Amino acid sequence: MKIIIINQHPEDVLGGSEIQCDLIAEYMSKLGNEVLYLAINGQKQEYNVEYNIKPFKFSYLSLYKIIKQQQPDVVYWRYDKKKLLVSTIILNALECPIVFGVSSRENVQKWMSYQHKDYSTLRSIINTVVLSSFRPIIRRINHIGFKFVDGATVLNSNLKNRIGVSKEEVIYDSMEHSLVPFHRDRDFIIWVANLKPGKNPEKVIELAEDISTDIIMVGEVQNNRYNYIKNPDNLPKNLHYLGSKSVEEVNGMIQESLFLIHTCDPEGFGDVFIQAWNSGKPTVSLYFDPDNLIESNQVGMVSGNMASFRKDVENLATNKDLRIKLGREAERLASEKFDPQSNIKKLENMFISILRNSKNN
């Protein structure tokens, strides 16, 4: 098959959907498919990948030209709903099947359920006002694009059957377990996310003030309100912010940690859970249980509030036998549900089925 993947690339923007598209491109190529990754707003002349990749400054005319020229068997779109409506109309006119990769709750919502507001600077106030007025309308218009989508993958069964696409499959994200070794003399627990509203890094600070165990925070500051976290003097002595790290570096840190803590609002899935489970590490989540897997598989705790969160963290930090027990279940779960080769083979089979149906029609 000839496959085009459309998204930003993790060497330009390190995010969950970008990491997944990179893995999909790599494994689809290994399966013998011809892959072209259109890296939207790509900044690099060369990428450290073993598949075809092209920096792509998005325009509808450019999209039309490249699809016309390449004539792919299928397009895998994981670029949110941005520009979706007109793009799907173009792809349909060129008789090119399109599969949409659902990565978050926002992907399946007709209207945005909430929007984090930033009033820290004059520019952010203007942006917030403009986005509050126009972004929901634009996203609602692009939601109509699902009428022209041939299939969809969802990374969480709770997001299935929400966009009106007839062929949907739950295909979990995957993560590889390559790592950069990490060592620290003191035991620690780890938190990994970009620092922005919705990820709730302030809850980590609140936790650190009430426990003695060291906490390492990893992630890029993506909202000015969290710039203060860069200064160690503003943090409890047992909280250590290390900035943004690569996937491999994070894997090494998780491998050496006691367990992972998670404070983010409910989202699509959260690939950091998979990273922890790959390492045989339990997870303690303040709010979110992805696809109800934590409690149903006994790989950690879902606390629900700060008092329980603090209690669960302290309990797990001091109970080695419990960590080992939950960690074994975490490793089993990772092997069963998040293997890249298995999951991307499922995606390939879905593409083949959609391609076969399009030819029959």
Image (cartoon, grey):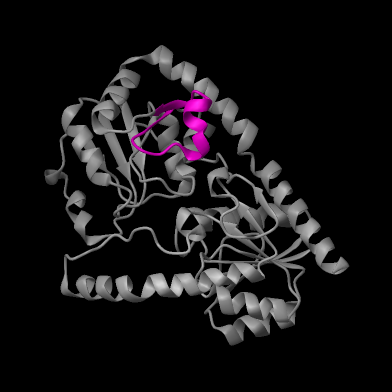
User: Where 264 falls versus 22 (above or below)?
Assistant: above
Relative side of 128 to 334, left or right? left
Relative side of 164 to 356, left or right? left
User: Where 349 falls versus 115 (above or below)?
Assistant: above
In the image, what residue occupies the spot 25% across and 73% down? 129
Q: Quadrant of residue 24?
A: bottom right
Q: How many marks?
A: 0
Q: Quadrant of residue 188?
A: top left
Q: Is residue 65 visible?
A: yes
In the image, what residue occupies the spot 34% across and 30% down? 303
In the image, what residue occupies the spot 48% across and 16% down? 325
Residue 125 location, x and y as percent? 20, 71
Q: Is residue 285 magenta?
A: yes
Quadrant into which the N terminus falls? bottom right
User: Where 156 falls versus 209 (above or below)?
Assistant: below
Depth check, front residue: 289 or 335? 289
Q: Is residue 96 magenta?
A: no
Q: Is residue 15 visible?
A: no
Q: Residue furthest top?
A: 321
User: Where 165 falls versus 242 (above or below)?
Assistant: below
Depth check, front residue: 241 or 124? 124
Residue 63 location, x and y as percent? 62, 80
Relative side of 210 to 107, left or right? left
The magenta stretch is 282-301
Q: Residue furthest bottom?
A: 61
Residue 104 location, x and y as percent? 48, 54
Residue 283 location, x and y as percent? 42, 30
Quadrant into which the C terminus falls? bottom right
Q: Residue furthest left?
A: 233
